[in-house]
Image: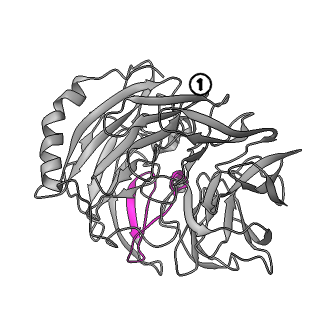
């Protein structure tokens, strides 16, 4: 990966960076003050997009239940500590479903969202509220399904996040950045237009977002550094030859503001990868569409290392606190694990016989849950040792799912696997082998 092309956009942000550092003093919110709900509260687990759960995962699983929700599911489910699973789909009727974690029974669903709600995972806050956008507005629901508010938007955010101060923040796929009060839905700052005047026709959908192409300038979920107050987002600027990633400082003292920090426009072919922030907040992991995984310095955007994974990744990487990074599948990509060793990356293992059909999720204890091709449109869910690649368990996904779109680990060790064909499968720890 070549050095980023540092634009005047970054230069203009230098003064903003100094002011923001003074405001925050290098510190984040008080301990325990995270606005995120307990559990897998966001599209990629958390503010960092880690696709990692700090729970003891089960080494042996068994199918608990399956639900055919209809239409398409595009992103992974979210979960809360009260035993609920949240998922969106594009089928007829409801486009937001809330299910009982243990049985798959519908607790409530909402038909107030249009089919483009499938572009996002429901975001859950510490008060049990649910935030989800469709093709016309951002919506909020109470834990029991009451529609609290909606705020009109232009475009579709591919999942929202929270700021360190507890506000809702998201970027629509055509480049509008919103910061809203999560209690009322009112704007906390004027909408920031990364592409002034951009419009969107909801009837056209947003298929380009599945690969992060120029027609979908902001194709992924932003990562948030809750301690330092930064937001990281992928963005393909109009007319640019390649896509890139940007960083902004979130200022919440006094008037809310977003101040540019840096820009790195060096992601050839675009990116379908939400930036994944390391646990210490010092580096970002993401992939491009020409077959490489990259680590960037989160403070400057400068490249640290690149590693050729050999395929176009169809989703975000998973990273663990011990520096194991697992790229998502896509095309004929195989299952692998890479170790971040600081200045370089090292391949831990790569299994050519395991074609990766989803987004691997890592858990405490050196485990990962990944979906591989089982032939004839079938998929298997694997439990693997992240350090060695050793297969610990293999379970068949019912039907012919083609590929999966996210793997969620619940706080009780349940594993949820949605498929592009609109099914959600739940696996529980096998009897006598619970974590």
Pointer 1 local density, CA inside 10 Å: few below 14, some 14–19, many at least 20: some
Q: Is residue 122 magenta?
A: yes
Residue depicted at x 33% and y 57%: 226
Q: Position of residue 371 (x, y in %)?
A: 74, 51
- Magenta-highlighted residues: 116-140
Q: Position of residue 63 (x, y in %)?
A: 80, 70
Residue depicted at x 68% and y 79%: 102
Q: How many marks?
A: 1
Residue depicted at x 51% and y 57%: 43
Local SS, label 1: loop
Vertical comparison of 432 with 238: above or below: below
Residue 92 visible at all: no
Q: Is residue 7 left or right of residue 420?
A: left
Instruction: Say which residue label 1 marks.
Output: 290
Outermost residue on the right side: it is: 376
Q: Where the C terminus falls, by quadrant?
A: bottom right
Q: Is residue 73 magenta?
A: no
Q: Position of residue 232 (x, y in %)?
A: 36, 43
Q: Is residue 353 left or right of residue 428?
A: right
Vertical comparison of 170 with 308: above or below: below
């Amino acid at each position: 990966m070549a050095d980023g092309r540092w634009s005047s956009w970054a230069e203009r942000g230098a003064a903003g960076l100094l002011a923001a550092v003074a405001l925050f003093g290098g510190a984040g919110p008080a301990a325990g003050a995270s606005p995120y709900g307990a559990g897998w509260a966001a599209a990629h687990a958390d503010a960092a997009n880690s696709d990692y759960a700090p729970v003891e995962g089960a080494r042996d699983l068994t199918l608990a239940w399956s639900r055919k929700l209809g239409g398409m599911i595009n992103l992974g489910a979210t979960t809360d500590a009260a035993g609920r699973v949240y998922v969106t789909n594009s089928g007829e009727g409801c486009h937001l479903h809330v299910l009982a974690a243990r049985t798959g029974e519908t607790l409530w669903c909402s038909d107030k969202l249009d089919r483009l709600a499938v572009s996002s995972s429901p975001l859950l806050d510490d008060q049990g509220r649910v935030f989800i956008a469709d093709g016309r507005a951002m919506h909020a629901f109470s834990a029991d399904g009451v529609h609290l508010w909606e705020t009109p938007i232009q475009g579709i955010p591919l999942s929202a996040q929270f700021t360190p101060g507890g506000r809702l923040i998201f970027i629509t796929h055509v480049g509008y950045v919103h910061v809203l009060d999560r209690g009322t839905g009112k704007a906390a700052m004027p909408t920031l237009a990364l592409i002034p005047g951009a419009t969107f026709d909801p009837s056209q959908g947003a298929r380009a977002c599945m690969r992060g192409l120029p027609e979908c300038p902001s194709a992924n979920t932003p990562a948030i550094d809750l301690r330092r107050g930064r937001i990281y987002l992928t963005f393909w600027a109009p007319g640019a030859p390649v896509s890139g990633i940007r960083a902004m400082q979130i200022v919440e003292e006094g008037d809310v503001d977003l101040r540019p920090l840096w820009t790195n426009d060096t992601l050839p072919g675009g990116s379908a990868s939400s930036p994944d922030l390391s646990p210490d907040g010092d580096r970002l992991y993401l992939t491009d569409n020409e077959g490489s995984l990259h680590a960037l310095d989160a403070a400057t955007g400068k490249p640290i290392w690149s590693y050729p994974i050999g395929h176009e990744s169809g989703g975000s990487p998973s990273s663990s606190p011990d520096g194991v990074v697992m790229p998502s599948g896509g095309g004929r990509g195989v299952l692998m694990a890479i170790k971040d060793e600081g200045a370089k990356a090292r391949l831990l293992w790569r299994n050519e016989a395991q074609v990766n059909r989803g987004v691997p999720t890592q858990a405490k204890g050196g485990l990962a849950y990944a979906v591989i091709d089982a032939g004839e449109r079938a998929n298997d869910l694997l439990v693997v040792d992240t350090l060695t690649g050793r297969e610990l368990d293999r379970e068949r996904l019912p039907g012919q799912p083609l590929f999966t779109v996210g793997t969620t680990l619940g706080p009780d060790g349940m594993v949820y696997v949605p498929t592009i064909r609109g099914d959600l499968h739940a696996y529980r720890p096998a009897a006598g082998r619970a974590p």
